[in-house]
Image: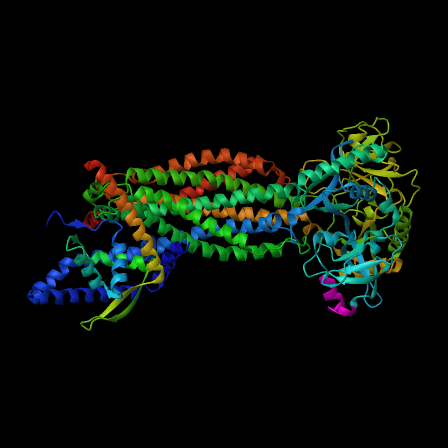
Amino acid sequence: MMTKLRPLLWRLRALVGREQMDRDLEAEIASHLAEATDEFIRQGLAPEDARLAARRSFGGVAQTAEVYRQVRSFRWLDDLARDVRFGARMLRRDRWVTLAAVCALAIGIAANVTVFATTNALLLRDLPFDAPDRIIAVGTLDKGVRTLTSGVSFPDLQDWRAANQTVEGLAAMREVAMTLSDDRIGPEPLIGSYVSANAFGLLRQRPLLGRDFVPDDDRRGAVPVVMLGHSVWRNRYGSDPNVLGRTTRVNGVPSVVIGVMPDGFGFPARSRLWQPLAVLPETTLAARDARMLSAFGRLAPGADFERAVTDLQRTGTGLAQQYPETNRDVVPIAAPFHERSVGRRGRTTFPVLMGVAAIVLLMACANVANLLLARAAVRSHEMAIRMAIGAGRGQIVRQLLVESLLLATMAGVVGWVLAVAAIHAISSALPSDLPYWIRFSLDQRVLAFSVAVSVATALLCGLMPAVHTSRPTVSGVLGQTGRGGGGTARSHRWSSGLVVFQLALTPVMLTGGGLILRSIVAQYEMDAGVDHSGLLSARIDLPEARYPTSADRARFYQRLDERLGRVPGLTAALASHVPFGGGTPRNLWRDDETVVAQPRRPRVLVVTTGPRYFDAFRAALSRGSQPPLVEPASRPSVVLNAWLAASVFPGEDPIGRRVRLIPARGPSSAPDTFTVVGVAPNIRQSSTADVSGRDGVAYVSYGSNAVASARVVARSALDPVTAASLLREQVRAVDPDLAVSELMTVDDLLHASDERVGLRVFGSMFVVFAAVALVLATVGLYAVTAYSAAQRTREVGLRIALGARHAQIVWLVTRNAAVQLGIGLSLGMVGAIGVGQLLKSLLVGTNAIDPATMVAVAGLLAAVGFVACLVPARRAMRLDPAAVFRGE
Amino acid sequence: MASDKSDVLYGTLGLMVIKTLEALGPLHGYLIARRIEQISGNQLVLNQGTLYPALLKLEQLGWISSKWGTSESGRRVKLYDLTRAGRTQLHKEEAQWQRATGIVERFLKISES
């Protein structure tokens, strides 16, 4: 080991002290020769002869020094240093070429780093707890009516815990809207979670202050306790360590603060408060078919994922036999925790963005490769001379690759800076309440990716020109006359190929960008069917602990509604969802139909509304009237929108008919037969549907569907601040511990919705990339046309001198460009159809094959192609033949 | 050049250098070269320059050490000396070499008989 290591250390030292060692060797050889000369003189030679004899017996001094250096150091490193120095000199000499290449590559690299960093933040990064790959998420699959994934019920979880040996422990949680209040500071809406006492233990996450939950906290009847998030502790309690032991009210329930979690912790997603599960009312936890909890576990030491799943499913089978009524079709399922769903759109968006960024980089590489090819033609003389004096092909390729590596390194640095700015812009455009594990920091993974991309870039744009340049034979190029040797036919083919490649990718990018742009516009222009501008909206969440039953909640809504109806200057109404805000999906059946499994029914969005809802939108029912806020739960009524009424009861009078609204997972015990009492105007609830698509909406009352969350929508002639405080007052008058959240205009609410934010942010990335692609392709086409025109100056001059007409000259110069544009466009249009299919799930109100977009893209490209050819063509036309020949 | 003089056998120069240093103590490059030539009875053609890469290699391996000193004629020269590791290595290589030459010798005897 030591004998291998020592020479290496020596060589490394030699890298540093290179000059000193050279001087030492020189001195040593000099004294050697002097000693030898002395001896030869002693033997009787004349001093001059003695000196020559000493030289002779020594051998070649230069060779010795060379061999000595090889032994001393790494030869390849010396060579590399020389290549780098030379390459840097070449890049400095052609500084405009260098600048252009660095700009193009920097944009390409920045695009890739930005997308990768975003993907890394949202999808790839490890979750911030100990050994995250050992944590599994557990849920259930209902094989019944439809295969539907769902949560876990508390009784099931306890049975799994008892029977399971492959997980260290199972914990349940439920993340909900909570309200924190105490005697000194008013109610504050916060996201919080009810968790099992062992949850933080399984995550190996200790509180920053105070103690973790203990099993006693999670026992029914225990004193309610609460764990604070760091931001709550800081903002609400001024980081006061004496907060421990103090009593606050969480959802109105007095709770003792037992601890503070560390900064940045928000498990499972965005919680700021945690309470034991036992705080939830008995009714939420007792039913075996109330599968409303999420669950996770940590694999026991030695157990693997597959065994854990088998183990769970064995337990599930046992429970299905024991409790057929509730568990017959329920299968436990598990997945590594990091595979939490990012939604259908997320799963499409990121691979598409990665692909798009890769295309931008490829196009930049094609441009730079073309640039290097053109320069290689100029440098073929230099290369020929190098080969003639004995440089191997490998050495020349290496020299050229070092140059492109230098280019890519500079571009990588510039690209990194651009990416940092872009990522900053993206993270500030995204909502601030993202799940806590999402952090847009540039970690080692992003850094490694950037380095890899830069190296790949160097190879992509450098390898082909390098191999190509090193090919011509010595005599061939040296024998040629004329300026710079000129490009060979082969290099023209290569650069034409690269231009066609770029031109073919551009329509793909532009079509994609165009479709996304149209979607963004369509989403904003989509007509809800009613006027929702100027409407104010506020959200209230009724805590389960204090409003455990439907009757409790209905009573609250009735009292609030009465107050809202009496506020002067305000038309305010309760509603579970605003227009474009979705609804609860149900399958609708007429009562004269038989409900069957696997229904293929029109999906209906159910919206729970209170009186004056349509008044607030300045709309009116076309038939019948709205049901009262609270009505007997046994005989509920419903208002259908016009589309739904017409499609369910074509040609019939819907009033007085009965319909069933059944959850997708099958009929439940709740009453689901409703009497139609009115027909409402068409107001759109779903925001992603096709523009022409019809949206079935059913409006029910709070009496039949007393959901725990409600919005107040209000139209007012008062100024928004006064109106907002009026709304807040009404809620506080009914329940002083209830916080009002999301108090904003309906327009702002929609603007901040996940769908619109996602489309805006990621859609605009796509559009920016498409624009960059267009610029790159234009520059590429221009550069190649201009370059080949410049190469043919002599020919053009000759033709003009011989009397060629302008049109002939223009055609001569732009013929290739036209052919390239033609081929590129035809290939690209095929790709454009493909990209539409790929983006289908992201599009809103736009068809995947959109003739208008495609025509626009083709027209744009043709126009841009024309401009790219215009300059070289004009230059050729104005060529003065005499000047050309004098210049030779 | 006489045909009975031979080039230094590949890989043996290092052995000759450390053996010389063991026998004579610290020497500078020229003296090492001269001693090797003299000991071989001027039978070896030593391109004296080739000695220096060999010395560097030995020094890298840690078998010899070098420091600047003065020659008998008062010149500033680099003096090479054997290290402990070099001495161990010399004994190892001597034994190996003798074993190898012994084997070759026996083979040569076979072909003679």
Residue under the image location 59 percent in, 39 percent down: A839
Q: Is residue A632 left or right of residue A791?
A: right
- In the current view of this chain or complex, which residue is farthest to the front? B113
Q: From where the camera sits, is residue A664 visible?
A: no
For residue A370, side relative to residue B21 (left or right): right
Residue A514's spot in the image, x, y percent? 55, 42
A339, B106: nearer the viewer: B106
The quarter of the picture where residue A83 lies is: bottom left
Above or below, A567 relative to A170: below
Residue A359, position in %: x, y? 48, 43
Total of numbered circles in the picture? 0
Image coordinates of residue A389 in percent, x first then y, are 21, 48
In the image, residue B85 sits, relative to residue A449, either above or below, namely: below
**Which color scheme is applied?**
rainbow
Q: Please provide the residue range marked out in magenta.
A: A230-242
Residue A209, quarter of the rendered image: bottom right
> Picture coordinates of residue A62 (x, y %)?
20, 58
Q: Is residue A296 magenta?
A: no
Magenta highlight: main SS = helix
Instruction: For residue A334, say whether it is visible.
Output: yes
Judge by depth and name the residue closer to the eye, B92 or A349.
Answer: B92
Nearer to us in this view, A687 or A47: A47
Left or right, A775 with respect to A591, comes to: left
